[in-house]
Image: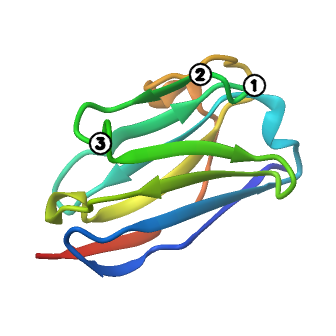
Amino acid sequence: QVQLAESGGGLVEAGNSLELSCEASGRPSSSGAMAWFRQSPGKEREFVASISVSGGRTYYADSVKGRFTISRDRYKNAVLLEMNNLKSEDTAIYYCAASSTTVGPSASPSEYGNWGQGTQVTVAS
């Protein structure tokens, strides 16, 4: 049974940074592509960033490109999301997702069969 556990969320002021971590248990994190999605109150879940199995390819939503960086930490069997220059519109619950079939980065939620419980990120303006 694959389990994903997010951490690192919190309350920050606009312009500051946070780093989220998603540790995978029950499978190597290198089994498939991994991604971050987020959901704000009253909105649908949206794609944030994804990373390929090898970690060599990444894909970002336009809204976070240049500010967020997704990476793999193979020692911790985890995927990280470094978030810089945070804005109030980044406030959301951030979810980690893992695929066991998709190799390359993907923005489609249907590619990911395993999801974490989410971690809250609140950016105060």
Who's the residue at 25% across and 45% down the image? 44
Position of residue 55 in the picture relative to residue 18 (left or right): right
Q: Are marks 2 and 1 in contact (CB under 8 Å)?
A: yes
Name the residue nearer the viewer: 105 or 38: 105
Neighbourhood count class around disc 1 (C-alpha, 10 Å): few under 14, some 14–19, many 20 upward: some
Callout 2 amino acid: Arg
Measuring from the top left, give residue 103's x and y in whole percent. 69, 18
Who's the residue at 82% across and 52% down the image? 77
Name the residue nearer the viewer: 25 or 62: 62
SS state under label 1: loop
Q: Which mark is residue 57?
A: 2
Name the residue nearer the viewer: 62 or 41: 62
Position of residue 58 in the picture relative to residue 107 (left or right): right
**Which residue corresponds to mark 3?**
64
Measuring from the top left, give residue 79's x and y in whole percent. 66, 49
Measuring from the top left, give residue 119's x and y in whole percent. 48, 69
Query: Residue 118, can we see it?
Result: no
Who's the residue at 87% across and 54% down the image? 75
3 or 2: tag closer to the N-terminus: 2
Callout 1 amino acid: Ser
SS state under label 3: loop
Report how far apart the C-alphas of labels 2 and 1 lie in the structure: 7 Å
Report how far apart the C-alphas of labels 1 and 3 lie in the structure: 22 Å
